[in-house]
Image (cartoon, grey):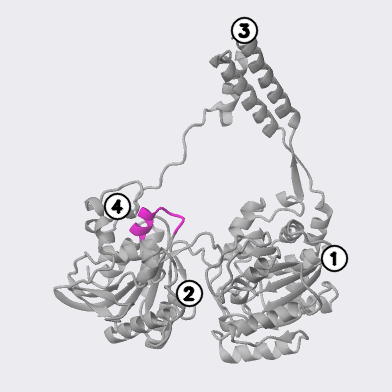
Amino acid sequence: MRKLPRASIAVAAAVLLLSAVLTAAGVKRAPAPDCDRKRAAAELMQVCMDRIRLYKEEAGLTLSEEDIHGTWLIGAPYTMVTTTIGALEAKRTTANPDMAALAVQLLKEAGVGPGDRVGAAFSGSFPGLNLAVLSACQVMEAELVYICSAGASTYGANQPELTFPEMAHRLVEDGILSQDGVAVSMGGDFDCGMEMYPDLRDDILARLKQLGPELIWEEDYAKNLALRRAYYEAEGPIQCFIGVGGSITTLGLAEDQLDCGVTPPYTIQTITKNSGLMELYNAEGLPVIHLLNIKQLAADYGLPYDPQRLPALGESAVYHTAQYPWHWAGGGLAAATMILLSARRRGRGGAALLLSLVLLLAGCGGQGENGAVSSAGPDSPPPAEGYPPELLPGGGAEPADWTLDDFPGVLEERFPGEEDGYPLLEGTELENTVRVLEGAKEGPVLYLVAGVHGDETAGWLAGNLLKQATLKAGRLCILSPANPYGAEHDQRNTRSDRDLNRNFPGDPQGWDAEQLAAAIFEDIRDKSPALVLDLHEARVRQGERDDLGNSVICHSLDGVGDLVLELLVASGEGGLCASPVTLYDSPPPGSVNRTVATELGIPVITVETSRGEPLAQRVRNQLELVEYVLEYYGLR
């Protein structure tokens, strides 16, 4: 067999590459086949938004300063019915009529057509997405059976004067929407709004009872799910289920296993008693639509994330399809094939005739704007400064990115029985050790808890590194990792698959998470520290619910307001961490932060570092923040 000359192979490759470039360069946008339906859904959503503006004005509410597009769907940073933390950017992104066009696209991908029954769970956290689904189903003539909660996260429909169930009901009364909810609930803790201000919660409950849809008030998780399923399936089976927001009945009590957008049937294989409705319906063969990770959802469908200007109706990528000039690709493939066949028969003769294609390809493919050759990639971020160098491998060396292997001493003694410490739950399978650092001078006592979630590696790794620190004054008690089983197995929860950070103040006779929580809570009570530091990591993929980035969380600023303010200023000026730190409130019920602050009156600062950064940077950020606090209290 004749060997192909290298020049012929190179020219054939150049022809293929050039044809690919010409194909990509010639792409044109064309209206999507369902463009008219998407436009109609977006127009209906805009009508709903305009009417909600009137409802809010009648209730005496004003346009939020954060509502830069004047949508009237952005709520307050915090009210007495706020259930959890929410990202303002995500709320502004979804307050866009194009979300209704996206909902049409998602329903189409899920196989929903006219006459199909769709079940949906709405929270008040994303009023824009709720309206989008309502508008899309109405335009598509799908029967929507939905249950809506009154509770909402920050910047959602969290203004107590007008909850989302009330907005939706009035839109039906005014003849704009055709389908009212089949039931309503308070949402929030236990789906009964237990974290809300009692008098305000009772007032909202009284108003909800007057709407018409039945009220769900069931604290038992399994019974609540069964009750909701009875509503969804009362008139027959549903063909698709949609979850908007992050309520416990929708997502479940454990880790969220679903990606954003459409999840095909039978993707979820394992169901537990902690599973929510989305997992249950998917495991039974239904497509489910998960609307929570807004940044990822917008990126997947070409919608702008928190834009400075909302695109005009019909501009967004969701209304269009791409049409490629495939004749370039076909011609290139044919030409490359002929070149190789010719070379195989006659040698190199044909290659020289087409060498100019290589030069042409090099000339048009390697230039940027104004003819400048573009070769440089993005610069690496500068390393953070200010962390305690004596605690890091190599005496403070700056490797590009550490892995766990760069901390051999720490890993080998991950769960040591330190001499300068004391045990918790001694003599049990859950035994752990609190390391105590003492300074030479008198000073305050601080308590550091790290690794409550075992898979948040940078938190407990920084905690273990801090066990090697020296203090000049005061005392530092370090419990790291607080969830040894989780850390050892790189999993969030305890051996019994329970979230330790949802079980405080705990129960000495309960499950392992409850026993650990009780021991930690009582130890903090016994030591009565001036401050508790709680080291965590924020998960990027969870987006709205967990996409906290680099941040600190305080249930109350009493006693630590000046410290937190100085910390935020220092990070904003570039003197602390690699990026500015954000302040959040409303830690979840059952967490170290909320429980210690409310029941013991001891201030707690939770540190979150973003898993979007390398491990090296996350550990640096943890250590820098802790070091800042220790210096503030005079311990370092």
- Give the residue pinned by disc 2: 585
Q: Quadrant of the C terminus?
A: bottom left
**Vertical order, 464 against 381 (above or below):** below
- Give the residue pinned by disc 1: 141
Residue 487 is drawn in which quadrant? bottom left
Badge 2 element: loop
Check disc 2 and give the amino acid type. Asp
Q: Which of pointers 1 and 4 indicates the residue nearer the eye? A: 4
Sequence-first disc among 1 and 2: 1
Confirm whether residue 478 shows in the render.
yes
Q: Is residue 614 magenta?
A: yes
Circles 3 and 2, Cβ within 8 Å, touching? The answer is: no
Instruction: Point out the stretch of residues depicted in magenta.
Output: 611-621
Side (left or right) of 509 relative to 316: left
Observer-nearest of 174 and 506: 506
Badge 3 element: helix
Badge 1 element: loop
Using the image, tell me which numbered label, if any, was put on residue 406: 4
